[in-house]
């Protein structure tokens, strides 16, 4: 056992650090200096994650060891790198922080993982502040939405409970071959996509209500009546991901386009609707 550990240690010491990582680490250190103690937790955590993820990425022995763990496949893509847990009579928090591994672009990998750490830290600080005033529950974690040869998409969810509950989702969609973090504007020739997608979503909303009268969406009815702010258009940076069928999926948080009982709402946009405005068909097909 000692010999194996020494061998792994020697493998780690021989790992070549890509030049771009030096730049990012230096930027993180400068940020830590500017923000002083508030950001030291982030910088330290990022450094720890960096060492851990590099070790996994380059060491076959470590990767094989992790593949033997139940629930962990031979190719590690996402791990829980930190978890906040609070559980008492009136306050509950379970916040899991994802860490992405095995990206060839280590700058992209580290940038995403630093973002996830910052999101979790901010959520936990907010929980501590608000839980001192009232009973509160927070459940946050992640789900892999898509993992194909071309596309990897991860969702991070946050469910907060006080008297009522809120739920929001954030997504990252990655071009695995070209190591690009995709954005909604990046997929289209121009901003015409906002109008095209919005129109299709309104049509889908109406069809859903016809099929199930118990569903309600905040769109004007045929008489044009509206007692609350109606859904008019998606945002230019609306939450989205690309699913395993290479279809664009638009997501709305709880309460964003419908009453709370409807929860998070997703709309798969038919590719034929988007065909003329897509910049290419590499992602949405």
Image: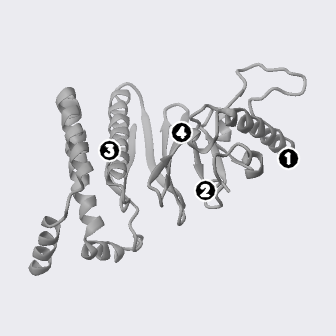
Q: Residue at (58%, 49%) from the top-left corner?
A: 241
Please name which of the two marks, 3 or 4, marks the residue nearer to the observer.
3
Residue 223: where, in percent of width, then height?
Answer: 90, 23
What element does badge 1 sit on? helix
User: Disc 2 versus disc 1: distance between alpha carbons?
Assistant: 33 Å
Looking at the image, tell me whether mark 1 or mark 4 is earlier in sequence order. Answer: 4
Q: Mark 1 to mark 4: distance in Å?
A: 26 Å
Viewed as shown, does residue 60 lie left or right of 178? left
Residue drawn at 34 percent across, 45 percent down: 111
In the picture of the structure, the residue carrying the numbered disc 3 is: 114
Neighbours of disc 1 within 10 Å: few (<14), some (14-19), many (20+) = few
Residue 122 lies in quadrant: top left
CA–CA distance between discs 1 and 3? Answer: 43 Å
Give how far apart the Cα atoms at labels 3 and 4 are.
Answer: 20 Å
69 w.r.t. 235: above or below: below
Residue topped by disc 2: 282
């Amino acid at each position: 056992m000692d010999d194996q550990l020494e061998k792994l240690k020697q493998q780690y010491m021989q790992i070549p650090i890509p030049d771009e990582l030096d730049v990012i680490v230096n930027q993180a250190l400068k940020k830590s200096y500017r923000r002083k103690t508030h950001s030291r937790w982030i910088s330290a955590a990022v450094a720890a994650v960096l060492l851990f993820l590099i070790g996994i990425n380059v060491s076959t022995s470590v990767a094989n060891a992790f593949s033997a763990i139940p629930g962990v496949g031979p190719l590690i893509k996402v791990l829980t790198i930190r978890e906040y847990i609070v559980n008492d009579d009136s306050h509950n928090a379970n916040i899991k922080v994802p860490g992405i591994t095995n990206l060839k672009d280590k700058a992209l990998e580290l940038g995403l993982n630093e973002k996830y750490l910052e999101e979790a830290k901010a959520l936990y600080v907010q929980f501590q502040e608000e839980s001192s005033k009232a009973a509160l529950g927070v459940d946050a974690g992640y789900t892999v939405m898509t993992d194909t040869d071309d596309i990897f998409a991860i969702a991070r969810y946050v469910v907060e409970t006080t008297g009522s509950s809120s739920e929001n989702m954030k997504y990252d969609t990655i071009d695995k071959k070209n190591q690009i973090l995709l954005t909604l504007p990046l997929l289209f020739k121009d901003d015409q996509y906002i109008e095209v997608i919005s129109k299709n979503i309104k049509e889908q909303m109406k069809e859903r209500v016809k099929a199930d009268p118990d569903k309600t969406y905040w769109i004007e009815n045929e008489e044009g009546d509206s007692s609350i702010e109606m859904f008019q258009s998606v945002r230019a940076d609306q939450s989205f991901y690309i699913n395993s069928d290479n279809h664009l999926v638009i997501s709305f948080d709880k309460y964003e386009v419908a009453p709370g009982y409807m929860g998070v709402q997703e709309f798969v946009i038919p590719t034929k609707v988007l065909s003329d405005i897509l910049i290419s068909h590499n992602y949405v097909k």
